[in-house]
Amino acid sequence: MPVTKEDILKVLSQVKDPDLGKDIVALGFVKDVNVCDGIASFTIELTTPACPVKDQMKDQAYHLVMALPGIKTVNINMTAQVRASHSEQKDQLIPQVKNVIPVASGKGGVGKSTVSANLAIALSKLGAKVGLMDADVYGPSIPILMGAVEPPKIAPNGKMIPPVCHGVKIISMAFFVPKNEAVIWRGPMLSKMVDQFLGAVDWGELDYLVVDLPPGTGDIQLSLCQRIPLTGAVIVSTPQDLAFQVAEKAILMFNKLRTPVLGLVENMSGFECRHCGGREEIFGSGGARRYGLANQIPFLGEIPLATNIRETSDGGRPIVEAFPDSPSAKAFFKVAENLAAQISVENLQAASPDRPEPKEISQPSECEVKIVWKDGHESIYSAFDLRASCSCASCVDEVTGKKRLDESKIDKNVRPLAIEPVGRYAIHFQWSDGHRSGIYTFEHLRNLGGVNQVPGS
């Protein structure tokens, strides 16, 4: 009996996207399936050209279909269509930009701009349409890093046409301020600059707009979060634990502004001598990984402290452009792939019609938490039950799933001292017993149920 389209779809349902957690058929990735005279052909359309597992999925799909009786040849066309972030806020400033990703840090000197530039070029080289907005008004460095000399041109409609460097469209305050002058602006001018760099620039169609933010938590960060819907932020820090105490302030800022943190990048993570090959942990190591694990934030990767990164940045050809096969460039490409995967996960979850989302969070008493969900469902949880259900790494073993927390040691009168949103997907509780690393996703809270629920929800 000849192989049918349905037979092919059935075996392809065994191929799962490990980041999105579903098979490629259920995700709608498989298109244009044809089979004739033993030749099977189909398209797998991913959510990003920077998918880190696209080769593995293609290889698995090929062997599964080839194993069907009567199949002689399998032709697979791998494509990608980046999905736009979903938000209730309709944006008119940049309607053709699918995803806006601010890159932030708690303090200066951690290499945030270098990371931004290399990530933008890496995403472009992987096949995406990318823009890079330098929002660091007081210390704009993107034109130097990208080797941009010519300023933007003005189109007939009055919009600025951003110069393109290494395949990336860029805009920066450095194009408009003489080298021997400094920008001294207050909040309203900074907010106006953000509006200009968004709405007055002809970005065209972009899959990703990377925004290099100034360090800290100031007016520009606030203006950006309030003016446009952001897909999620990337936090850059050096490895030491002390640095992450500062970086945490940027994370808390994005949480309060309901912007998801897509992941952490550990920059200057170890120095390798190009003469002897020895490695020195100048700033320590593993701070980002440890912080991400403790706070349930994805770890996107680590970038070494390397002379060639500095040299190529100073020369206006970032390492991923100048030496794409070098270990340093490969580290940036890996971070870019992991970032693209997290963006796809965030967009898929945000687009799910079944995704629970709170409308109102309150405390009927010190030891109770009440959530009114957007679908009208109401849940009231005892503080003790919430504390006992924490799933952070210190309370639950991530490998075995076994509970580490001894409930008998929890104070019966434990109460939340602070209840804070974490982007658009979770709630962070600070407890009276000192525990503060638990992130409770909306799905987890909804599944916990609570008491006194509204019937019929």
Image (tube, rainbow, N blue to C red):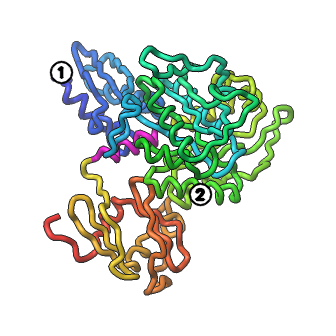
Mark 1: amino acid? Pro
| Label 1 residue SS | loop
N-term-proximal mark, 1 vs 2: 1
Direction from residue 427 to residue 433 in the image, left or right: right
Look at the magenta stretch and give its main secondary structure.
Answer: helix
Q: Residue 316 in the image: x percent, y percent?
A: 70, 23
Find the residue positioned furthest to the left. Answer: 456
Q: Residue 41 in the image: x percent, y percent?
A: 29, 19
Q: Residue 397 in the image: x percent, y percent?
A: 50, 64
Can residue 135 be seen here? The reply is yes
Residue beneath disc 1: 2
Packing grade of label 2 (10 A; few <14, some 14-19, many >=20) is some
Q: Which mark is residue 249?
A: 2
Q: Nearer the viewer, residue 67 or 198?
A: 198
Choose top left, top right, bottom left or bottom right for residue 422: bottom left
| Label 2 residue SS | helix
Q: What segment carries the magenta color? A: 340-352
Direction from residue 250 to residue 114 in the image, left or right: right
In which quadrant is the C terminus drawn?
bottom left
Q: Quick check: 157 above or below 330?
A: above
Measured Cα–Cα span from mark 1 to mark 2: 61 Å
